Image (cartoon, rainbow, N blue to C red):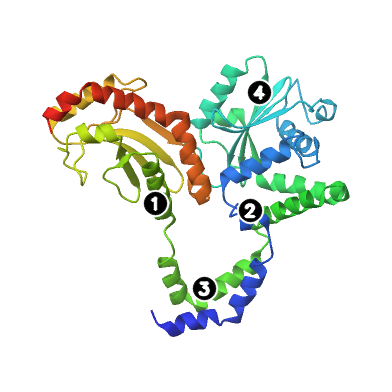
Amino acid sequence: MNRNKLSNLLTDQRLEELELRLRKPNIFYILKFQSAEIRHSNFLAWLLNPNANHGLRELFLKKFLKDIFAYRDLDWMDEFKIDATDLGSVEIRREWQHIDILIICKEFIVAIENKFLSKEHSDQLTRYRKTIEKYFKSHKSVFVFLTRYGDSPETEEDKQVWINYNYEEIARNIEIILNIYSKMLNKRVRIFLKDYLTTLRMEIMGEEDKLINLVKDIYASHKEALDFIFENKPDRLAEISYIIKNKVKQKGFVLGSISKTYIRFLTTKMDKIIPRKATEWTKRESFLFEFEITLNRISFKTSIAPGDEEVRAILIEIMEKVKGAKTPKGKKWIVHVIEGFRDGFGEMSDEEIENFVDKIFSDKLSEIINNVDEEMLKRSQDLQKLQ
């Protein structure tokens, strides 16, 4: 790379103009909030909660509910009845049964699935609807599919059930609140709302065309230098993998064959008895616990590797006795336990990732690992004979 090309980029006045415009403080950009689905859901849950410390009380919640009920012709509720509805005892839940936001009123439930960047997957809308019907049989229910531009669900059945709602309407309601109620709001809350409105305009509503055109001009003039920078930018996936690897070590596990996208490990006791007769992993372990990592999701698995068939047969027998193990999946790689965790993983800060890993270990994984460890040790003599 020619050093002069980088120098020309740094001395371009248009780059300085871009930096000045981007330097305007915005709490959501400072926290890298703008495209993180989890953080949008957290902020919206805060706004929707009439008992939260924003001072809006039921204002934002009522505007949201009026929008929603205006979409559906229901005999029990419409946008005109909301003002007369008591919402003071409303409960707002985050990530209950994996549902992004749940609004629990006395007589009805509103479930919100938020898809800011990601897409729906694994029939999740159908599953969430069935979950609500199972746990809230005495409530009427409404289902809201919140996306950037009001996208429809994939299946015809879900299209009939889920109401399409978009972030432009969220922005419109915030703008109305700021225009009418600004003087009544706490100064800090007013700043938060203004920053969030700016974020939505930047990310969704296309009101920063001049800024985008400026970026295009700079890129056209300095393509080679900028491409060089992009190609050598820090690898976030590698950073996340490093954090999780260190967390696994801190918890006293023995690292096995690993890569940037796979962190594999054993308990200290299992490390002594698991045969090394696999044909795929570098350290040839026949069995490993495994984290599979992407920027969006993390999944945990138990995995029996391809290799010696006698070893595989014993490991399959052992895993079938593990509490919570399911019918094995796969032929080459045999998986009895798999746990997936939600979208937006790559948008977390380092500290959030560490806390997340601690939480999933305490909530689910420690019990699974202990159950496997216990069953493996019962067959320790059989396994050691095959080493």
Q: Position of residue 267 (x, y in %)?
A: 30, 34
**Which three-letter amino acid code belongs to the residue tagged 1?**
Tyr
Q: CA distance from mark 1 to mark 2?
A: 33 Å
Going from N to C along the chain, the mark reached first, 1 or 4, is: 4
Find disc 3 in the rendering and name its residue. Answer: 219
Label 4 crowd (10 A; few <14 / some 14-19 / many >=20): some
Find disc 2 in the rendering and name its residue. Answer: 204
Q: Secondary structure at mark 3?
A: helix
Q: CA distance from mark 4 to mark 3?
A: 49 Å
**Which three-letter amino acid code belongs to the residue tagged 4?**
Ser
Q: Tell me, yes or no, whether the two marked residues, 3 and 2, touch with CB atoms within 8 Å.
A: no
User: Who's the residue at 66% across and 14% down the image?
Assistant: 138
Going from N to C along the chain, the mark reached first, 3 or 1, is: 3
Label at residue 92: none
Going from N to C along the chain, the mark reached first, 1 or 2, is: 2
Vertical relation: 172 (above or below) 123: below
